Image (tube, helix red, strand yellow):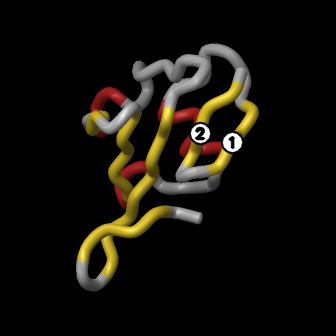
Amino acid sequence: MQIRLNGKERDVRDDITVADLLAEMNIHPERVAVLVNQEIVKKPSYASAILQDGDTVEVLTAMAGGMGRIR
């Protein structure tokens, strides 16, 4: 299935969770904020938040002056 991750199309496996996606990206979940379809996913829900085909996902990290996308 395909999602849009930080503005770019990405193929992912079916039934992937936010936690799985972060693990594939080698990103520590405590250091980022994740939005799926412009809604914040709370950190305790990362392991149960299953992504759907066509979802738009933004993975953001804190940086000086605000938040920035993970590239």
Figure quadrant of the N terminus? top right
Mark 2, Cα crowd under 10 Å, few <14 / some 14-19 / many 20+, is: some
- Residue that appears at 48% across and 55% down: 28
The answer to which quarter of the image holds residue 35 is top left
Report the front residue among 46 and 12: 12
Left or right for 8, reference 29: right
Along the polypeptide, which appears first: circle 1 or circle 2?
2
Give the percent coordinates (x, y) of residue 25: 64, 51
Give the percent coordinates (x, y) of residue 67: 31, 68
Mark 1, Cα crowd under 10 Å, few <14 / some 14-19 / many 20+, is: few
- Residue that appears at 42% across and 49% down: 29
Left or right for 10, reference 47: right
The mark found on residue 31 in the picture is none
Figure quadrant of the C terminus? bottom right
What residue sits right under mark 2 in the picture?
4
In the figure, 22 relative to 19: above or below? Answer: below
The reply to whether the C-beta atoms of the residues labelled 1 and 2 are less than 8 Å apart is yes
> Mark 1 falls on what kind of element?
strand
The answer to which quarter of the image holds residue 36 is top left
What residue sits right under mark 1 in the picture?
9
Mark 2: which amino acid? Arg
Give the percent coordinates (x, y) of residue 15: 61, 15
